[in-house]
């Protein structure tokens, strides 16, 4: 599963879990839901439309466990959730592509070449070339505004 797909749903709420739950607690909640929603456990007199809805719910529960039950994918998902929370909680001034930023500034404390963009406050957004692919948010050096770097 691509990591871009991980953050589209709240996998914790699907399992009725919290991000602070440990693996044992997540597994217990998953097993409880699987037993409740498993297609073999459903009665035969359910309308066809509801059968499909129950099957989709079962599939979502299974996908949630596959993401949250694996240490590596859970970590990636938690990082994406955190990044999303940060972009929602901070004032993102703009979304900017690197090609729209000035190249080769020397204001940053790194030895690498950098991209820069003037902030509306008069400060500067600066990101070094070696950081550009790893970060998505850059803060102004004078105010609390952020820009989102589009790759």
Image: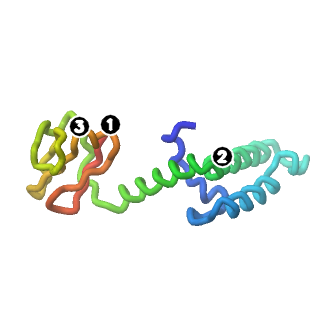
Q: Mark 3 and mark 1 in contact? Answer it, CB < 8 Å.
A: yes
Q: Earlier in the sequence, mark 2 or mark 1?
A: 2
Residue at horizontal 78 percent and vertical 53 percent from the top:
34
The image shows residue 8, relative to residue 29, as above or below, that is: above
Q: Tell me the number on the disc at residue 125.
A: none
Q: Position of residue 109 (x, y in %)?
A: 16, 51
The image shows residue 113, relative to residue 88, as above or below, that is: above
Which residue is denoted by mark 3 in the rendering?
98
Mark 3–mark 1 Cα distance, whole angstroms, equals 7 Å
Q: Position of residue 136 (x, y in %)?
A: 33, 46
Left or right side of 78 for 131: left
Q: Secondary structure at mark 2?
A: helix
Q: Quarter-wise, where is residue 49 in the image? A: top right
Question: Extreme top residue here?
Answer: 99
Q: Position of residue 98 (x, y in %)?
A: 23, 37
Q: Earlier in the sequence, mark 3 or mark 1?
A: 3
Q: Tell me the number on the disc at residue 66.
A: 2
Left or right side of 121 for 98: right
The image shows residue 39, relative to residue 141, as above or below, that is: above
Q: Position of residue 80 (x, y in %)?
A: 46, 50
Mark 2–mark 3 Cα distance, whole angstroms, equals 35 Å
Mark 3: few/some/many CA within 10 Å (<14, 14-19, 20+): some
Tell me the quadrant of the picture where the N terminus can be found.
top right
Q: Earlier in the sequence, mark 2 or mark 3?
A: 2
Residue at horizontal 14 percent and vertical 61 percent from the top:
142
The image shows residue 81, relative to residue 112, as above or below, that is: below
Residue at horizontal 51 percent and vertical 41 percent from the top:
3
Which residue is denoted by mark 1 in the rendering?
151
Q: Secondary structure at mark 1?
A: loop
Q: Mark 2 and mark 3 in contact? Answer it, CB < 8 Å.
A: no
Q: Secondary structure at mark 3?
A: helix
């Amino acid at each position: 599963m691509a990591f871009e797909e991980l953050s589209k749903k709240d996998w914790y709420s699907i399992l009725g879990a919290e991000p602070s739950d440990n693996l044992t607690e997540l597994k217990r909640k998953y097993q409880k839901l699987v037993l409740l929603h498993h297609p073999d456990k459903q009665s035969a007199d359910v309308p066809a439309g509801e059968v499909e809805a129950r099957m989709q719910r079962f599939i979502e529960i299974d996908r949630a466990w596959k993401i949250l039950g694996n240490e590596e994918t859970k970590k990636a998902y938690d990082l994406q959730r955190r990044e999303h929370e940060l972009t929602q909680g901070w004032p993102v001034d703009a979304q900017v592509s690197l090609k729209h930023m000035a190249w080769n500034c020397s204001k940053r404390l790194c030895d690498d070449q950098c991209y820069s963009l003037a902030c509306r406050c008069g400060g500067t957004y600066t990101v070094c070339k070696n950081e550009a692919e790893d970060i998505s948010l850059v803060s102004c050096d004078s105010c609390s505004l952020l820009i989102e770097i589009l790759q």
